[in-house]
Image (cartoon, rainbow, N blue to C red):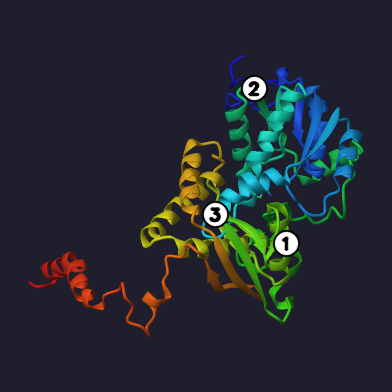
Amino acid sequence: MSVSEPEQGFPPRTASYEADPEQVGRVLLLYSGGLDTSVMLKWIQDRYGAEVVCLTVNLGQPGEDYEVIREKALRLGALDCHVVDAREEFAREYLLPAIKANALYGGGYPLFTALGRPLIAKLAVQYARTSGCDTIAHGCTGKGNDQVRIEATVATLAPELRTIAPVRSWQMGREEEIAYAREHGIPVKGGTEIAPYSIDDNLWGRSSEGRWIEDLAHAPEDDVFQLVTRPEEAPERAQIVEVEFERGVPVALDGERLAPVQLIERAAEIAARHGVGIIDHIEDRIVGLKVRDIYEAPAAALLLAAHQELERLVCTIHQNQFKPQLDHQWAYLVYAGLWWEPLRSDLDAYMDSVNEQVTGTIGLKLYRGSVRVVTRSSPNAVYDASLASFSQSGGLFSQAASPGFIELFSLQSRMAWRLRNDS
Ligand code: ARG
């Protein structure tokens, strides 16, 4: 059968990595325990007559009970449900490189979801292989970036595996999904009248989409903030936090050495208490849509501000002019789901090289929603107080050389000005 011929009740397939419904035998389902993936768990068994193995990945999303999720999966007919704690790998292999690249997409989004998806999909490949699955299923819709990140990863790392994305094809609305859930004994949490926000979270931040967020003229309602204290309710006393870095990696907070996961959790806690890390973001998705997201990313707000400042201090003017362009390219690749693209590792080599010098301590003042650098120190700072000072004439810096410098430095600009203006 050709790839584009529609099968009985299934939409036609467009891509080579999409599963042929006839060939789906055992599916590795990326399971969160929420409504969509629980309905999927039943629906895949029903529609494909396939077996389902679930995988739930812990990337530090707060408030999850993984035992409850596992039992729910097994009750809904999963052969097995693997729960993987990937926080350590996420922090070391994904968040630390993001810090070295000062990673922000579209000027504000610290990429927590975009960084998590390639790791989740890589684990899906690994568990699909060890559990004898032929297909990977995920709960992404057809309108978002996450489908791109997951499917690009699977197709890159495991050309022998196929994917299905039931939410993209089943054409059930929320009402129908709830009806399906009730019919199949799938518990539906809370009130069903108003759809909840669509949430995604991990160690690095939390996003909310949907409801009034889609109305660009609607200012944020208080109930959307579940991680960061609203600035108007934050403590009246400011707090100063010192972040210490070694070769671009944050290693201590206020003098206490912490491993990456603990350090990021602690940074999140402190910044969240002071209302720091709220981002109301207009974003260009990779699939063309322009959308609004509300982000709460306290750890990223604190650590990126500190890293960026320290990097600026130890780098030369030329590095400081150049690196933001590569930072920008890094963030775009990761946002776009191209984590496995060689350009990303090329860029990482550059980030690592620059970050060799990024050692030192930055003090930040947190106060009711704002974070501001107040102190800096580094053995590698390209800074000499006596040279920069107004109060001393300074040995190496010859002020007498300045007029000659200005004459040559401005030469072409002066010539061009004259040509264009003296007529
Ligand atoms: N806009 C962000 C991104 O594309 C957040 C997406 C959140 N994903 C979700 N499934 N709710 O990375």
Query: Label 2, on which residue?
Result: 6
Q: Is residue 104 visible?
A: yes
Amino acid identity at mark 1:
Arg
State left or right for residue 154 relative to residue 229. left
Residue 129 vs 147, above or below: the answer is above
Q: Are marks 2 and 3 in contact (CB under 8 Å)?
A: no
Identify residue type, mark 3: Arg
Q: Is mark 1 within 8 Å of ligand 1?
A: no
Direction from residue 285 to residue 131 in the image, left or right: right
Whole-percent x, y for residue 109 in the image: 58, 57
On residue 279, which mark appears? none
Q: Which mark is residue 247?
A: 3
**First in sequence: mark 1 vs mark 3:** 3
Identity, as a three-letter code, of the amino acid under mark 2: Pro
Q: CA distance from mark 1 to mark 3?
A: 20 Å
Query: What's the residue at 69%, 74% (across, down)?
Result: 231
Q: Which residue is mark 1?
A: 266
Quadrant hosting residue 362: bottom right
> Which residue sits at x=55%, y=63%?
360
Q: Secondary structure at mark 3?
A: loop
Give the residue at x 80% y 29%: 53
Circle 1 Cα neighbour tier, 10 Å, few/some/many (<14 / 14–19 / ≥20): some
Looking at this view, is 158 or 421 the one in front?
A: 158
Outermost residue toward the left in this view: 423
Q: Residues within 10 Å of mark 2 (few under 14, many from 20)?
A: some
User: What percent of the width, then of the height, locates residue 72?
Assistant: 89, 39
Q: Under tag 2, what secondary structure?
A: loop
Q: Earlier in the sequence, mark 2 or mark 3?
A: 2
Give the quarter of the figure containing the C terminus.
bottom left
Name the foreground residue: 421 vs 375. 375
